[in-house]
Amino acid sequence: MNKRVKSFGYALKGIKAVVTKEANMKIHLLIAILVILCGVFFRISVSEWLICLVCFALVITAEMFNTALEQLVDFVSPGKNKAAGRVKDIAAGAVLVSAVFAAIAGFIIFIPKGYDLILRLLQT
């Protein structure tokens, strides 16, 4: 089998591992599905879809790097270690930062649309 084809297989194996074994990834994916449903419901613009897609990619990628770093740290430093703990905390912090900014982008896109919907419903 071609090396490039094999590398895609390894990548897909890694994605599957994170999706099936990491609770936080399941939460991120659930939120992404909810955002997609809201995007369809509110008929968001192409540029708003692009912002959502970039946010999905950023948060999911950050979570995957966090998971990889946590597993690497646990492998090389199985015992209690301050430096290892700091590495894990920083990686988790990166996920939090990406998720917070993704949520802010989502609020900027969806709150006005929800507000308009409520106003329309109240006028009828």
Image (cartoon, grey):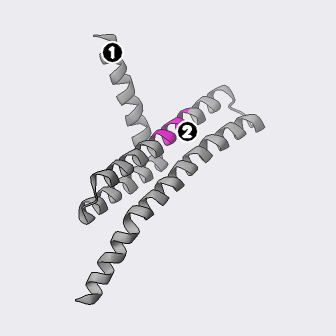
- Where is residue 51 shown, x and y percent of the image? 38, 50
- Where is residue 10 shown, x and y percent of the image? 38, 23
Magenta: main secondary structure: helix
Residue occupying the point 24% across, 62% down:
43
| Disc 2, SS | helix
Going by the numbered disc 1, the residue's amino acid type is Arg
- 41 relative to 12 in the view: left or right: left
In what quadrant of the picture does the N terminus appear? top left
Q: Dot 2: within a 10 Å radius of its alpha carbon, few (fewer than 14), some, or many (20 or more) residues?
A: many
Relative depth, front residue between 77 and 111:
111
The residue most toward the right is 82
Query: What's the mark number on residue 4?
Result: 1
Spatial CA span between label 1 and label 2: 25 Å
The image quadrant of residue 42 is bottom left
* Residue position for label 2: 66
- 98 relative to 77 in the view: left or right: left
| Disc 1, SS | helix
Relative depth, front residue between 53 and 70:
53
Relative depth, front residue between 59 and 43:
43
Q: Is residue 79 above or below residue 25?
A: above
**Observer able to see residue 113:** yes
Going by the numbered disc 2, the residue's amino acid type is Asn
**Which comes before the other along the chain, label 1 or label 2?**
1
Residue occupying the point 41% across, 42% down:
57
